[in-house]
Image (cartoon, rainbow, N blue to C red):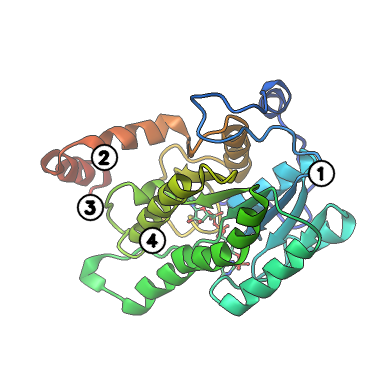
Amino acid sequence: MNDWTEPGAVLPQPTHKQAAVLTTSSATRRWYQPNTPMVDWTGRRVWLIGASSGIGLACAQALRAAGAQVTVSARHPQQVQAWATQDAGVRWLPLDVTRVVDVQAAAREVLASGPLDLVVYCAGYYKAQRATAFDLNQMLQHNEVNYQGALHVLDAVLPGMLAQQQGHISLISSVAGWAGLPNGLAYGPTKAAMTNLAETLYVDLQDQGIGVSVVHPGFVATPLTAQNEFEMPALITPAKAANEMLRGWARGQFDIHFPRRFTLWLKLLKLLPYRLYFPLVRRFTGL
Ligand SMILES: NC(=O)c1ccc[n+]([C@@H]2O[C@H](COP(=O)([O-])OP(=O)(O)OC[C@H]3O[C@@H](n4cnc5c(N)ncnc54)[C@H](OP(=O)(O)O)[C@@H]3O)[C@@H](O)[C@H]2O)c1
């Protein structure tokens, strides 16, 4: 099923649930909250990288609908440019995350108009691969987009955030990074690295006034998953994924995972000893 946002789509308004979260949560960090809740998006400056489609684009639309000023980056402008032309609160800034010089130049441009409240790294690449058909180029391509690109972005934005002691970094990882799964030979390790990167960033930045969160989506209907030939369990739309992310940020969460009817089972599965984990994965996936 392909259910991503079409070009020229009308801006979504916040859902009732989302609006409730946005208006009722307190922006003060409580002892049980890893991050300061991000509640009021009015005038907040957000840079979404890898947001020309799917989850990133839906998230940019939801944040804009909530009042944020969004800068959207990726390589292909088709789904964003018309929107950016019509709305002064949206900026299209083309970027290939694998090119460190381009990332630095783009960051300079974004930061020239002021500090960022939130940077969301959404860029992702996925092709199914198994060890029986090992493809080094594909392995490295996943690493370049999914992991190294995030390092390029951190290199460009962290010094400014540290100097100002403010901002929040959110990295989109995946449930595929929690434990090894069939077809995930190239993708899974990059997402495991992303999760570990976010955890370690949190440890280092918690006293620096900088928030850090990691997003672990289950299956979302986007161009990335359109290639899957199996029926994806608990599949959700990009708009639903974006709502979950806004809710997670509003609650000050570190680990934002959804849909819970799927991710909670996977969290349980990864706690099992390997002698149980491997046979259960084979049983559920048939691979
Ligand atoms: N869909 C799911 O079920 C699912 C589940 C778990 C995690 N995720 C993660 O969610 C994130 C968003 O993926 P999605 O599902 O929304 O798929 P998507 O619609 O294909 O989005 C991927 C985004 O990454 C951008 N991108 C790819 N290579 C890039 C590059 N070299 N430089 C800049 N941008 C680049 C793409 O834009 P351009 O091609 O225009 O550059 C696109 O905007 C990814 O990190 C993905 O791994 C998705």
- Does residue 94 appear in this view? no
The Cα atoms of the two marked residues, 2 and 3, are separated by: 17 Å
Q: Earlier in the sequence, mark 4 or mark 2?
A: 4
Q: Which mark is residue 43?
A: 1
Q: Nearer the viewer, residue 18 or 207?
A: 207
- Does residue 31 appear in this view? yes
Q: Residue at x 56, y 24 (%)?
A: 30
On screen, 192 above or below 273? below
Q: Nearer the viewer, residue 10 or 229?
A: 10
Instruction: Name the kind of residue labelled 4 in the image.
Output: Thr
Instruction: Name the kind of residue labelled 3 in the image.
Output: Leu
Tag 3 residue: 287
Which corner quadrant of the image does residue 275 belong to? top left
Q: Earlier in the sequence, mark 1 or mark 3?
A: 1
How crowded pointer 2 is (Cα within 10 Å; few <14, some 14-19, many 20+) is rated as some
Q: Earlier in the sequence, mark 2 or mark 3?
A: 2
Tag 4 residue: 190
Q: Position of residue 113 (x, y in %)?
A: 81, 60
Instruction: Name the kind of residue labelled 1 in the image.
Output: Gly
Mark 1 residue element: loop
The Cα atoms of the two marked residues, 1 and 3, are separated by: 48 Å
Q: Earlier in the sequence, mark 3 or mark 4?
A: 4
Task: Farthest residue to the left: give it.
Answer: 275
The Cα atoms of the two marked residues, 3 and 4, are separated by: 21 Å
How crowded pointer 4 is (Cα within 10 Å; few <14, some 14-19, many 20+) is rated as many
Q: Position of residue 226 (x, y in %)?
A: 50, 56
Tag 2 residue: 270
In this view, the mark in front (3 or 4): 4
